[in-house]
Image (cartoon, grey):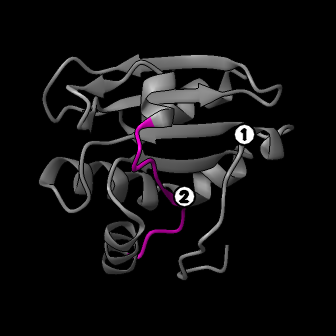
Amino acid sequence: MVEGEPVKAHFTLSERRGHPVVLAFYPADNSPGCTAQLCSYQDEMDAFKDLGADIWGISRQHTGSHEKFFRTKRLGFPLLADEKGDVVTAYGLGLLGLGVRRSIFIIDAEGRIAWKRIALVGVTFQSADTLKRELQKL
């Protein structure tokens, strides 16, 4: 990914083996809670990089919505479009087939789920500090 430029590509966890990946499932581009969440992660990108971790945002919006959000907020990590909900379903995070529950999964370097938090409802999200502490344990 070129810094500041969106990349249209398929992302797979198997390609990132050897590095932890933070999967940040979020309900909607440009919503107040999601904007606060993803921008807080952006503010800590250097710390995540120092820990060798990638961050991927995932929601059900289409790539056009993600691209606009990415550019507007100047995000430095990919936003993955799960328009059909396949990934959301695989992780058990769907909401009435239309949305996604705000959730975080940390995938370790071997590709296993090392830590997760799945929200019931609301805009509360896991802080960058919490994620960094969990990544340091790996």
Vertical comparison of 34 with 132: above or below: below
Counting residues from the start of the chain, the first of labels 1 and 2 encountered is 1
Q: Image quadrant of residue 10? A: bottom right
Question: Is 82 one of the magenta-colored residues?
Answer: yes
Relative to the observer, which residue lies in front, 77 or 95? 95
Q: Identify the element where label 1 is drawn.
A: helix
Q: Residue at x 43, y 52 (%)?
A: 41
Q: Image quadrant of residue 13? A: top right
The reply, left or right, for residue 129 in relation to residue 9 is left
Q: Which residues are magenta?
A: 74-85
Residue 107: horizontal and vertical position, in percent?
66, 28
Which amino acid type is marked by label 1? Leu
Residue 47: numbered disc: none
Residue 37: horizontal and vertical position, in percent?
30, 48
Vertical comparison of 11 with 9: above or below: above
Q: Quadrant of the C terminus?
A: top right
Residue 13: numbered disc: 1
**Crowding at mark 2 (Cα within 10 Å: few <14, some 14-19, many 20+):** some
Q: Residue at x 26, y 30 (%)?
A: 97
Judge whether residue 79 can be spotted in this image: yes
Relative to the observer, which residue lies in front, 28 or 32? 28
The reply, left or right, for residue 120 in relation to residue 45 is left
Q: Residue at x 25, y 43 (%)?
A: 27
Which amino acid type is marked by label 2? Met
The residue singled out by tag 2 in the image is 45
Residue 54: horizontal and vertical position, in percent?
65, 49
Q: Identify the element where label 2 is drawn.
A: helix
Residue 24: horizontal and vertical position, in percent?
44, 40
